[in-house]
Amino acid sequence: MAVGLGYYGKSLMHAEELLEYIKTPKWDRIFRIKDALMAGISVGTISKATNGIDRWFLYEIQKICNMEKELMKYKIDSLPLELLREAKGHGFSDDQIVRIMNSGTEDGLYEKRKAAGITRVYKMVDTCSAEYSRLRPPYFYSTFEGGHANESKRSDKKEIVVLGSGPNRIGQGYRIRLLLCTWSPGH
């Protein structure tokens, strides 16, 4: 099973093969772009080979590659907590981190992270640009960024959580949540 941008190790393709391969859009192009960056091919060269994939996107993938390269230097017992915190802030899963390090287990890393206080917090999305009062049910996302400032508050009211993913724009899920939160049996 692949996690993140996939394969953690050396690409089976050489630099020249990768550059030729990424010229044509295919289902796995993003993975080969990552392989090219891991192999040290520059963002400029990749942008040119792909007929102009925006450098901003390529630099974002480069950040992921740089984090992977840093994580590869450690084992679970020697992994600095600040690096773990940074990796979680970049969106790396526990499973992904132990695969990259080739050390430990997902449960072991979870326990290390939990003991260090590196836990997710919930931030509120202003889905309506402050057009509506805060009395409406809020829409949250989880993150490891921003310290421990949890914006979700416990309530004695009946609540419902709608979990999902997909090509939703901000606000679309919010309207669904409003509909479900205002629905009650018998109506």
Image: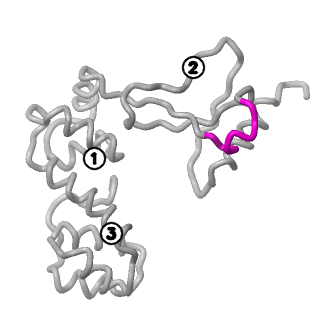
Q: Position of residue 137 (x, y in %)?
A: 70, 30
Instruction: Place residue 145 in its image quadrant.
Output: top left
Callout 1: helix, strand or loop? helix
Residue drawn at (56%, 49%), measured in percent from left and top? 165
Q: Which residue extends farthest front?
A: 130
Label 1 to label 3, Cα distance in Å? 20 Å
Q: Which residues are magenta?
A: 126-133
Nearer the observer, 100 or 45: 45
- Give amino acid for label 3: Leu
Callout 3: helix, strand or loop? helix
Instruction: Place residue 131 in its image quadrant.
Output: top right
Per the image, the residue denoted by label 2 is: 153
Report the magenta stretch's main SS. Answer: loop
- Give amino acid for label 2: Lys
Q: Position of residue 110 (x, y in %)?
A: 28, 29
Q: Which residue extends farthest top?
A: 156
Label 2 to label 3, Cα distance in Å? 38 Å
Q: Which numbered marker is on residue 184?
A: none
Q: Which numbered marker is on residue 96?
A: 1
Callout 2: helix, strand or loop? loop
Residue drawn at (38%, 36%), measured in percent from left and top? 144
Marks 2 and 3: CB-CB under 8 Å?
A: no
Vertical position of residue 13 compared to residue 187: above or below: below
For marks 1 and 3, give the one nearer the viewer: 3
Is 100 covered by the magenta stretch? no
Left or right, residue 95 beside residue 77: right
Instruction: Place residue 164 in its image quadrant.
Output: top right
- Ranked by sequence position, the earlier of labels 2 and 3 is 3
Quadrant the C terminus occupies = top right
Per the image, the residue denoted by label 3 is: 58
Is 132 covered by the magenta stretch? yes
Marks 1 and 3: CB-CB under 8 Å?
A: no
